[in-house]
Image (cartoon, helix red, strand yellow):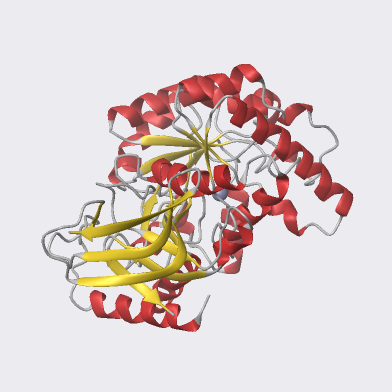
Amino acid sequence: MKRNFLAVAVCLCVAVLGCTPSSASRIPDPSSPTIELRNGHWFDGERFVDRIMYSVGGYFSASRPARVDSVIDLQQGYVVPPFGEAHNHNVDATNAAAAHAVIDKYLRDGVFYAQNPANVLRARSGLTGFINVPTGIDVTFSNAALTGPGGHPMGLFLRNLSRGAMLPTDSNSTSGFVWTIADRADLDAKWPQILASHPDFIKTMLLYSEEYERRKSDTAFFNWRGLNPALLPEIVRRAHDAGLRVMTHIETAADFRNALLAGVDEIGHTPGFRGNEKTELPDFAPYLMSDADAELAAQRGVFVITTLGGPAGLPDFALRARFARLDSLNLVMLKKHRVKIAVGSDSYRTTSVPEAMWLSTLGALTNAELLRAWTETTAQAIFPGRKIGKLAPGYEASFLVLSGDPLADFGNVKHITLGMKQGVLIGSR
Ligand SMILES: [Zn+2]
């Protein structure tokens, strides 16, 4: 990324924040200038086509409007929809400096849409005014994750607590992050407080749910268990009644099936994404998805989020290759049944860029399929009601310009020369 792109992004951020109320709408501004976008190669979901497009009131138009306020020469660049990050907990901030840092990082990487499935409430409120505005990124939050007693992410919570990064209240309604739900009575007692935190969606946890009874009170499995899978359908029913979608964390193919059968909308990981409790993969069997389950996911329109890039950094080449093999088998299975694959990293230090790069090395998806997953499908996973993720008339005028063709070399997704969100220019070199 060129320095000027970031500099302009930061300036726009500051300029707009000065006059934007915290409750600003994420809808484009109808009075925004009309812009002609010429000399670009535009991604149509499969290939790049040469065309002229317009931003009118913050939306794409293919026909020339009566008035054009300005013209942007895209200089034969490759125009793609903005990237998405369907699973990351790093979109949080407790002060303005941290908020600027996270927004700048996402804008710099071209990742305009993000989903945070388990966040501390006070870190969400630190982003008020910085997100869900044309010059920021657009984000949804689950607030707390719902798990069983001693279930994941209680281990993470206790570790953060001991480090001073979280507060004792972060395990209850005043701050969110994690709720333990033991049984139906517990759900009855806590559900009103969960809704009172105003989540954008509900995050639930299944870990080795096929062994729920064996693991539920064995200390050896602390943090390696989740909700009673028998409770999940009732949680989904209540969430849907409240107009909220449900994402489920999974580990195994059995968790994947249990989540589907419960009626969830998004599955937060692909089975086997981190192997077993020792981050090893002695056996693929617990993690291989079946044709029947992939078919069910497709029929129900469930989004499956990748989060497969973790092993990319493993020093053990043979183990890394085993993860790559398992990941490829599962991605091919999802692709075969036309399941909606959304790109998410679950990597606190990064955006979804390294995840997409890892996926590109697996060979399961073509570059065009991966680009479509990372842009169109991921945007739909996060904001299913919005016209985003496509470069088509009527869609929000949001895009990135790449200096090289990402279908020829996927690494070109890192060479962003210009970005626009909802008709507002993010920057140019
Ligand atoms: Zn996560």
**Image point 41% across, 23% down: which residue?**
234
The reply to whether residue 225 is visible in this rendering is yes
- The answer to whether 209 is drawn above or below residue 363 in the figure is above
Quadrant in the rendering for residue 338 = top right
- The answer to whether 81 is drawn above or below residue 8 in the figure is above
The reply to whether residue 217 is visible in this rendering is no
**Image point 53% across, 19% down: which residue?**
296
**Image point 39% across, 56% down: which residue?**
175
Image-based side of 106 in relation to 219, left or right: left
Image-based side of 75 in relation to 13, left or right: right
Residue at the extreme top: 292
Residue 87, image x, y percentages: 51, 49
Residue 404, image x, y percentages: 56, 65
- The answer to whether 81 is drawn above or below residue 189 in the figure is below
Residue 243, image x, y percentages: 28, 33
Quadrant in the rendering for residue 363 = top right
- The answer to whether 127 is drawn above or below residue 372 in the figure is below
Residue 125, image x, y percentages: 33, 63
**Image point 66% across, 47% down: which residue?**
308
Image-based side of 134 in relation to 281, left or right: left
**In this orientation, which residue lies closer to the viewer: 90 or 371?**
371
Which quadrant of the figure contains the C terminus? Answer: bottom left
Report the label total: 0
